[in-house]
């Protein structure tokens, strides 16, 4: 072999060696895979998987999140109309020409506040002149006395009767009737400026009281709800419903109510009114004859004589009503003295329950 051929061969071997080393380095760096494509592919898979996972979690959270449902309404078998007129008729509807307040209590006679004053000032010999606030009707206008200073309330005239009442949120507020038979409330607005607001027209007379005293006989009452009862010129008996923006005719109350003072079962209504969203079973409104509460269950006799039960501790947002047995209820008898209810089914079997409360349309 000539020297030229040896040189060519060495050059070829050198090039091949360098190429092999370079290919080895590249293979080691990429581990034999298209690195860029792999990264892009993995990014897509991770993103898709994460999104699916998050969507699933969010959906589960929404489905399992408990709603704020503390009341149950059932459709009654027949219309309900209860007349509570006698309840509010016992109130004092006398024309009030003056009203006194001491701390958080208001009466139309100052001597009615004396016992409250003596609790705080047992050694005082005062029997009058101790009230924190005093409003007086004079020639159709209202004069109020606060901290010994008497001023006339501007913009109010032709008043025929006035009542002062203490509100926890707003302090002393006034209710007054004018000669046009319009009933107003006088209190501070959102800007802190006191002004009059019309509550009801064609009012014959009115009374103001704490909701706990009377309204709880009609609706459950939480806290101290100021309630207005009034007679209209056309002889209706109206009562304010938890606010002064809505009044209901007490002769046409179209529901019955049962509630627990201890909170051991939910507040329930029985009605045919369109104002309620009624409980459902198998996607149908539950139409009720009787409801009775046991220690752990809400028990319902339906219009088709079935006995449905619902656990007191359930999530009321879901249809968890269960059919007690396939046989229909033939007869039901309550022992109010011993708080027992006996149910006879159409197969002549009987079951007795201890009950806490009952609600019937009869």
Image (spheres, helix red, strand yellow):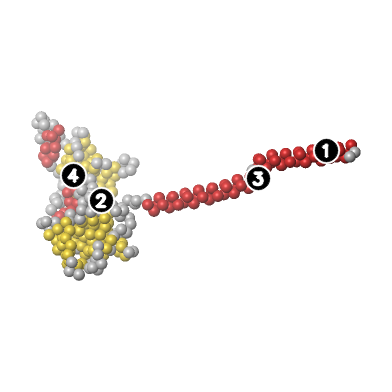
Instruction: From the image, tell me which residue sits under label 1.
Output: 10
Instruction: From the image, tell me which residue sits under label 3.
Output: 32
Evaluate whether residue 356 shows in this view. yes
Depth check, mark 1 against mark 4: the one in front is 1
Please tell me which residue lies in front, 147 or 221. 221
Name the element at disc 1: helix
Of pointers 3 and 1, the one earlier in the residue sequence: 1
Q: Is residue 11 above or below residue 247?
A: above
The residue sitting at the top extreme is 123
Measured as percent of width and height from the top left, residue 128 is found at 12, 35
What is the C-alpha distance between the residues marked 3 and 4?
A: 100 Å
Instruction: From the image, tell me which residue sits under label 4.
Output: 137
Q: Residue at x 13, y 53 (%)?
A: 90
Of pointers 3 and 2, the one earlier in the residue sequence: 3
Mark 3–mark 4 contact, CB under 8 Å?
no
Depth check, mark 3 against mark 1: the one in front is 1
Measured as percent of width and height from the top left, residue 100 is found at 17, 40
Of pointers 1 and 4, the one earlier in the residue sequence: 1
Quadrant of the rendered structure where residue 268 is?
bottom left
Evaluate whether residue 278 shows in this view. no
Please tell me which residue lies in front, 292 or 175. 292
On residue 242, the disc is: 2
What is the C-alpha distance between the residues marked 2 and 4?
A: 28 Å
């Amino acid at each position: 072999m000539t020297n030229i051929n040896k040189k060519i061969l060495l050059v070829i071997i050198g090039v091949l060696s360098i190429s092999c080393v370079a290919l080895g380095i590249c293979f080691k760096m990429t581990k034999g895979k298209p690195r860029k494509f792999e990264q892009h592919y993995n990014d897509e898979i991770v993103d898709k998987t994460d999104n699916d996972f998050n969507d699933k979690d969010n959906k589960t959270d929404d489905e399992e999140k408990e709603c704020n449902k503390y009341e149950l309404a059932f459709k009654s078998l027949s219309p309900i109309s209860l007349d509570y007129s006698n309840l509010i008729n016992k109130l004092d509807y006398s024309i009030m020409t003056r009203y006194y307040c001491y701390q958080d209590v208001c009466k139309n006679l100052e001597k009615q506040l004396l016992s409250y004053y003596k609790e705080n000032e047992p050694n005082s010999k005062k029997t009058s002149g101790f009230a924190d606030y005093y409003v007086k009707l004079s020639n159709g206008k209202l004069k109020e006395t606060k901290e010994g200073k008497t001023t006339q309330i501007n913009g109010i005239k032709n008043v025929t009767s006035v009542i002062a009442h203490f509100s926890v949120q707003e302090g002393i507020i006034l209710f007054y009737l004018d000669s046009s038979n319009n009933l107003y409330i006088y209190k501070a607005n959102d800007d802190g400026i006191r002004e009059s607001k019309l509550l009801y027209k064609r009012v014959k007379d009115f009374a103001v009281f704490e909701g706990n005293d009377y309204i709880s006989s009609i609706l459950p009452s939480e806290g101290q709800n100021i309630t207005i009862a009034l007679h209209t010129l056309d002889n209706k008996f109206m009562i304010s419903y938890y606010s002064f923006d809505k009044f209901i005719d007490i002769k046409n109350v179209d529901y019955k109510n049962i509630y627990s003072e201890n909170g051991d079962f939910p507040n329930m209504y029985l009605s045919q009114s369109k104002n309620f969203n009624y409980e459902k079973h198998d996607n149908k409104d539950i139409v009720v004859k009787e409801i009775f509460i046991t220690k752990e269950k809400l028990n319902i006799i339906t219009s088709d004589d079935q006995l449905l039960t619902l656990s007191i501790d359930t999530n009321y947002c879901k249809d968890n009503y269960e059919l007690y047995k396939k046989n229909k209820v033939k007869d039901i008898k309550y022992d109010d003295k011993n708080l027992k209810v006996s149910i006879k089914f159409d197969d002549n079997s009987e079951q007795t329950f201890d009950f806490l409360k009952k609600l019937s349309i009869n």
